[in-house]
Amino acid sequence: MSTTPLSCPLCGGQGVSHYHRDRRRDYWQCHRCTLVFVARHQHLAADAEKAVYDCHRNSPRDTGYRRFLSRLTVPLLEHLPPGARGLDFGCGPGPTLSVMLEEAGHPMALYDIFYAPDRRVLEGRYDFITATEVVEHLAAPGQVIEDLAGRLSPGGWLGLMTKRVASREAFADWHYILDPTHVSFFSEASFRWLATCLDMRVVFPAADVVLMQKQ
């Protein structure tokens, strides 16, 4: 176990304690925002991380995957005016969420550090931004989410999809930590802390969906 002082990658706090250990990694929890995270020295190298993503076989033609993504799209679309412009952040090798939202009449931009790396889209302004199964992969989730919130127009929505930490006991047997690319694990309390910090309204329409509105 590392004895190097750690800072929380969400809030920057240094009040952290050891939360769990498995055969490969240690997990730490921040006392301020409750994020559970893996220290950077135990993250995969970029090429190894991409190799995992290259194995994903998501496609707009996959009805099961569309049904999974609808957990976010259905509640998000209830808040969007016609023609609202969006960004799908972390679209992956087989963009599907953007296709679903374009079918609903919303023009979409795409960004992914590996598969759509044009950072010019991150300079735009958007009515909504989505990140499905993304934030758990982020080494610096606090900075990334703050940057995304800064790209929203007033009243805009940030839609996130990630499974949430329930308890220390459940964490130990959680399939979500078996993926070596997952390094940041949020609880509902983490998102409430984040919403307060960013002056955003937060709602939880499903167990793994979070919608945050810019005030």
Image (tube, rainbow, N blue to C red):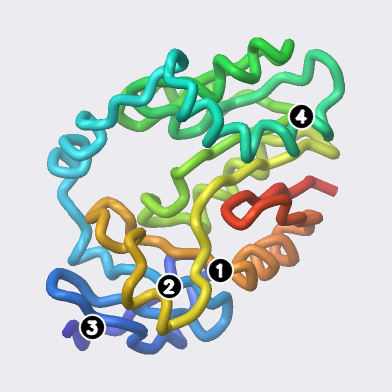
Q: Are the residues flagged by discs 2 and 1 in contact, CB closer than 8 Å?
A: yes
Which residue shows up at 52% across the image and 85% down it?
31
Which residue shows up at 52% across the image and 26% down it?
66
Q: Are the residues flagged by discs 4 and 2 in contact, CB closer than 8 Å?
A: no
Tag 3 residue: 4
Question: In which quadrant will I find the N terminus?
Answer: bottom left
Q: Position of residue 26 (x, y in %)?
A: 24, 76
Q: Give the SS element for disc 1.
A: loop
Q: Looking at the picture, does residue 52 appear above or below residue 203?
A: above
Q: Residues within 10 Å of mark 2 (few under 14, many from 20)?
A: many
Tag 2 residue: 36
- Separation of marks 4 and 3 at Cα, in angstroms: 44 Å
Q: Earlier in the sequence, mark 3 or mark 2?
A: 3
Q: Position of residue 154 (x, y in %)?
A: 83, 37
Kindly identify the amino acid type of the residue bearing the numbered disc 4.
Leu
Kindly identify the amino acid type of the residue bearing the numbered disc 2.
Val
Closer to the eye: label 4 or 2: 4
- Separation of marks 2 and 1 at Cα, in angstroms: 8 Å
Q: Earlier in the sequence, mark 2 or mark 1?
A: 2
| Numbered circle sitting on residue 187 | 1
Which residue shows up at 36% across the image and 84% down it?
19
Q: Are the residues flagged by discs 3 and 2 in contact, CB closer than 8 Å?
A: no
Q: Give the SS element for disc 3.
A: loop
Residue 160 sits in quarter: top right
Q: Toward the viewer: 39 or 75? A: 75
Closer to the eye: label 3 or 1: 1
Q: Give the SS element for disc 4.
A: helix
